Image (cartoon, coloured by chain):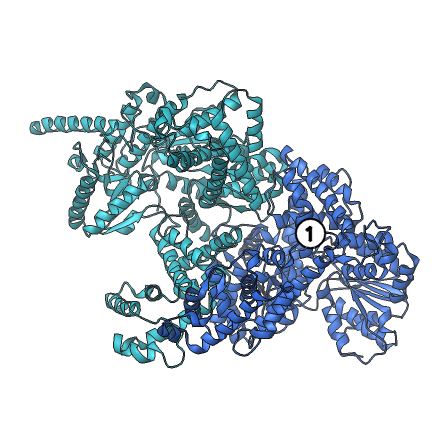
Chain colours: A cyan, B blue
Amino acid sequence: MFKPRPKQLAVLAYRSGYMGVAAVPGSGKTATLSYLTAQLLAETELEESQEILIVTLVNSAVANFARQVNEYVKANGLLPGYGYRVRTLHGLANDIVRGKPSAAGLDDQFSIVDERESNAILAEAVDAWVRRNPEAPAAYLAPQYAENGHYRTQKWAESLTETARSFIRQAKDDLLTSRAVLELLAQNGGDLSLAEFCAEIYSDYERALAYRGAVDFQDLIRLALQVLRDETAYLESLRRKWLYILEDEAQDSSRLQEDILQLLAGPDGNWARVGDPNQAIFETFTTADPKYLRAFIESDGVDGRELPNSGRSTRSIQTLANRLIDWSLAHPQESIRARKPLSKPYIQPTPAGDPQPNPLDDPAALVLVGEAYSATKEGMMVTESCKRWLAQNPYGTAAILVARNTRGSEIVKFLRQKGVPYVENLNSSSSTRAVIGALARVLAYLADAKSAGKLAEVYRVWRRDDRDDPADAAEIKAVSDSLKGLKRVEDLVAPRGEHDWLEDDANDESGAGHYADLRAFRERVGIWLRAAEMPIDQLVLTIAADIFRDMAELATGQMAALHLARLGESHPLMRLPEFAAELYDIAANRRRFTGLGDDEGQFDPDAHKGKVTVTTLHKAKGLEWDRVYLISVNNYDFPSAEPQDSFIGERWYIRDSLNMSAEALAQLASLQQGGAYHEGLASLEARFDYAAERLRLLFVGITRARKALTITWNTGRGTAAEATPLIALRTFWEEERKKEAAREPQR
Amino acid sequence: MASISLSRAQAELASAPLTGSVWLEGWAGSGKTSVGVQRILYLMERGIPAESILLFVPQRSLAQPYIRAMRGQRAHRGGQVYVHTMGSLSLKMVETFWFLVAERAGFRYPRDLPNFLSLEMVQYHMARAIEPIVAERDYFNSVRINRPRLYSQIVDNMNKAAIVGFPIDEIGSRLTSALAGGVEQAHIYGDAQTCALEFRRYCLAHNLLDFSLQLEVFRDHIWATPQARTFLRGRCKHLIVDNVEEDNPASHWLLLDLLETSDSALIIYDRDAGFRRFLGADPTAARRLRERCETKATLEGSLVMGGEVQALSGRLAAQLGPSVARANTADPRPALITEAHRFHPQMLDWVAANVDELVNARGVSPTDIVILAPFLSDALRFSLADGLARRGLPLRSHRPSRALRDEAAARALLTLARLAHPHWGLPPTNFDVVCALTTSIAGLDLTRAQLLAEMLYRNGCLLPFAEVRSSAMQDRVTFELGERYDRLAGWISRYVDGERADAIDIFFRRLFGALLSRAGYGFHADVDAANTAQNLVDSARNFRWSLDYMSRYDDDIDLGLDYVNMVDRGVIANFYARDWISDAEEGLLIAPAYTFLLSNRPVDYQFWLNIGSEGWSRRLYQPLTHPYVLSRGWQAGAVWTDEDERELNRQSLRRLLLALTRRCRKGVYLGYSELSESGYEQRGLLLETIQSLLRRLAQEGQDV
């Protein structure tokens, strides 16, 4: 049962108006917010169809939140889901637009293209543009690459795609259609060539979406805002409907999100925003910015509160995190300092008697390694350390945090080599991937039904419920090995005449015990083979119903079926081999796909005791482990805008270290605001922004640890150096330890 | 007289005098159609010639009870009763009197025959007529809808203008003044207007008639000729009109006229109905007919609902609007069975388990159960049918329509057509060839088909089986199958080498007759496949006929290639109807809610799926058209507001719930899962309504 502490009680006292809460990591802000929801539901006489609207950042949080509140609602004998709705911003925008699609120029059946489809459309638009404009790269390629065909086509197109993506995202955020941008360009006399390129690509991209009757995620948000602004009566009805708006993770709010929620709340409405500005780590991928939440909390008419107590980490770890706040406030680079990457409140331990006391402090469990490791060495050291620790702490939880997915995959290889038990929490969770992988294997076999190897894999899929039993697992392996050796697959799955492998050979090869089992298998595969020509969604549903027992797995299978059906609609030439490939891509983590099941709730580190979790820092948000390794903290992943730092946005083949995306955005801004554009300035500014965000990412990493934290860095391709903030923290901690040691003898 | 047992009031109405007009209204399930059926039989029994009776319905399926009853009464003298909808009647009239009016109506070739367009052909011609303008002038740039839907909304606007009776050049101004939202959307109605006019111009120039033009020609030109009026009035001495509330103002206009000269009339009106609004149904306008009828009668109450369902019906309606007369005080809860689930498949499982229980444990006939959803995707229908089949409840498929390209048999024929027409430059993919072989050759499994395709499908051609050099491989495929393959490959190769290509439908027919329907081939023993082939032939022939005719005016057409392309893109042959009504009589019906309503078939139990879906209460949103703004009762200059929309949703849901419960005898099962099949949470007005009813009932229970 949730027992609020004093600062949480102050938040729970909220009943009306605007409230802004700055929370620290581990302060229980989500728990507080769901408890507040339950309280408001209990106390408020909601009129019919009135609701409390809760907005949060990611789907997994939606499910978590809903589950918590549902428990309460069910206790009152109603169907769950009554009186409140939890949405991500996209979910909310979808609700708003679907409530009045024609106002946004959409019909009922409009579809939303996902990231993959949107990228594919953009890539097509860029390719076409690049072909039409063969001379364009000359203005931007560095001289030594200007005549190189590979750079003039492929590399140029890559950079331009990335640039156009940022440009289009920003233009949509500024509510500018491609036509509007082109008009602005026509009025503007100056040389804004990047903006011109991007505007033309934007226009092609828009046309392609319109032709499909589709919108992308940015459109959804832009259109939601547009509908709310244009349709005042509709807005009024939504204001009546959503009596309270509670916003979690408000630090990752973009301006549009703020505009939408502000409109929905109205000047006299009820809007409570909770977030930790120090954990805003999505600026690079979106137009989010923590400054919006900070400004909100400080503005007039807003009741500002804090949730500074956290029982998550030891005092030492909290001290280190607070030190990072101080250091950043006095950052050696003035431009970064001015951005206030991190801000107060400091993290404070929980008061005495709190149900969540801080773990016992052990300063020795906080290790900052200054030594320069190669990437391989770092991976091996961390792997070894993990292995030792897990052996001693079979019920403990541990995580290795990386800045990028690719580094995560490298670490997984080390762990596998050394036999360290691990779980991945990279792009999509492993259970979704397992479900999709199982379906992919069956489809791949049907697309290549004469392959014995693929048939053997189908057999494993068919027995997937038994694989955890050691005896069964051995048997599954034996049977699947014998299937793999089949010379004539058809003699098993579709025997004709005298050839029937099952009657002739199976008994000899794998023991009489498998006969019945293989007969049943043959029967099932036979059904699938005959079903192979059904529409793809029906085929997938059939297979899913045959191989999955768990409801969440079945539901994920159903979503996969719909996903493929939609894909098939926009790509009429896709057939079974291509559908199988698509599912393999999801299973192999090359595509984003949100399934249902254990990953519809948030990843739960405590469900993986005795294993190490490998995760990106971004996906680690909201999670905590006993022991945390924060690795690759070098000036490549955590730059500080110093001369020797390299920046992901700056390509070596683009002249003058220009960050094309940043320059394109600056040109867009100058178009709108009428100010002058100076080439290069934006690239520099982008460095500061990126450095500031990376400081917050580091802060997030540090605050994931409960009892023990190890930070290391590596030299990357040989040139990377220790990240400046790590040097500062390490120096600080070494001094602290010295002071501690000096005090020790006196004790 | 046939044996329908009628109440006294019903019997009196059915045997009313042979002159005079009767307006009959009442709830669904009050026995109105039984009166209508009995009336026709009575008329014929009294010696009225069948061909002087017109049975007029808004859609063909609603005439079924009449047709069934008349089938049993063949012995009467004379011809057949005329059964018509406004569409079929106007078509017939335009066909008959074409040469009298074609020139006056503005057709460019008045001495040529008219060409009536099916919906799919409208799509095809629409693409030809307006696509160049849309592309060139960058029309509809702020609207996101795909082409087939864009075209169908333009057509929809034209149809609305025709049935309501305003000129098509008023479409744009009506929509703009009523709906103008943001600036960005303002111009799209203008674009839609231009396209409608352009399509009309194109139709007149090519002797084509879509529904709107057909109706306009009928009303404005044919009806103005005395010959035509005399002709039709002579055939409509006795009128039986059912479900007049589902019909449109054009029908009402015609019926008003026919009433003047008919000897007798029975006009039946369903209260609280009017579900085909999106097709122009106008229950308010229908009531004008009431004023012209000499006798006004009402059938009260319900012959269908049990007490608990009746209570449920009343309570649900009261949640959304005024109470229905004569409140029933029974506790509705026994008639309302529900369970909450997290995932969509859980809900489907629950439905299957309950159907199982009703049929196998409680002896309910499957024909007395219906499963309803606001929308019925193929996937949903399939999952459900599959789940029921796994419980040993075999289902026939009850799909109203389905794309031909989704049928394996049709796809096989299209693939073989591509192989036989290499000059199209559309060689099929390897996997398509594999599928075409398995479907075409009896006994050929996917595995062996893949072996064959891998060895023998080269550069768009099927090589002879003899090209397989390895005898081990030949043995794997088996000689029997190899021989069948050879005959197929040989047939295609001879066709390719032949003098000239057949028309596409003739190609299909030849291939089917010469080979595929023979023993040893896939269509031989498979009735469904043979039916699909027949459907494909019909669709291709219609396509050809329509365009053969066009080739007089337009020579830029490659028929076969166009056909295959259009089917692939889903522009045509997208839906072909199966006779789902006769299907439904044999088993459990799964249908969209409104389809069920228009089948006039009460059941014991109803399952409502996805009660969280908005689709239960909301009209279809279409950015380029609007059923109310383009309706007859719309006041010029009025603005369609959100309040209108909300009120409309409440009223539509109320009507729908009344209509459904009035077709239910014993109970309603509510299927609810928190997450929809796409994984989204849903909470439409129906869910809200049910929630607050449950809350209220719980409170009342506590109070007791």
Q: Is residue A500 above or below residue A460?
A: below
The kind of residue on which mark 1 rests is His
Q: Residues within 10 Å of mark 1 (few under 14, many from 20)?
A: some
Q: According to the image, label 1 marks what residue?
A: B125
Q: Residue at x 32, y 36 (%)?
A: A25
Where is residue A618? Give x, y as percent.
34, 39
Judging from the image, mark 1 belongs to the subunit labelled B
Where is residue B53? Give x, y as percent.
84, 69
- Taking the image as shown, residue A222 lies to the left or right of residue B310, namely left
Work out whether residue B181 or residue A583 is closer to the camera in this orientation and state it: A583
Where is residue A526? Give x, y as percent.
42, 71
Where is residue A529? Give x, y as percent.
44, 68
Extreme-left residue of the structure: A745
- Taking the image as shown, residue B664 lies to the left or right of residue A324, namely right
Quarter the C terminus of chain A occupies: top left
* Residue B173 visible in the picture: yes
Work out whether residue A118 or residue B249 is closer to the camera in this orientation and state it: A118
Name which quarter of the figure residue A334 lies in.
Answer: top left
Q: Is residue B525 above or below residue A107?
A: below
* Residue A16 visible in the picture: no
Name which quarter of the figure residue A660 lies in.
Answer: top left
Work out whether residue A52 or residue A285 is closer to the camera in this orientation and state it: A285
Q: How many marks?
A: 1
> Quick one: SS at disc 1?
helix
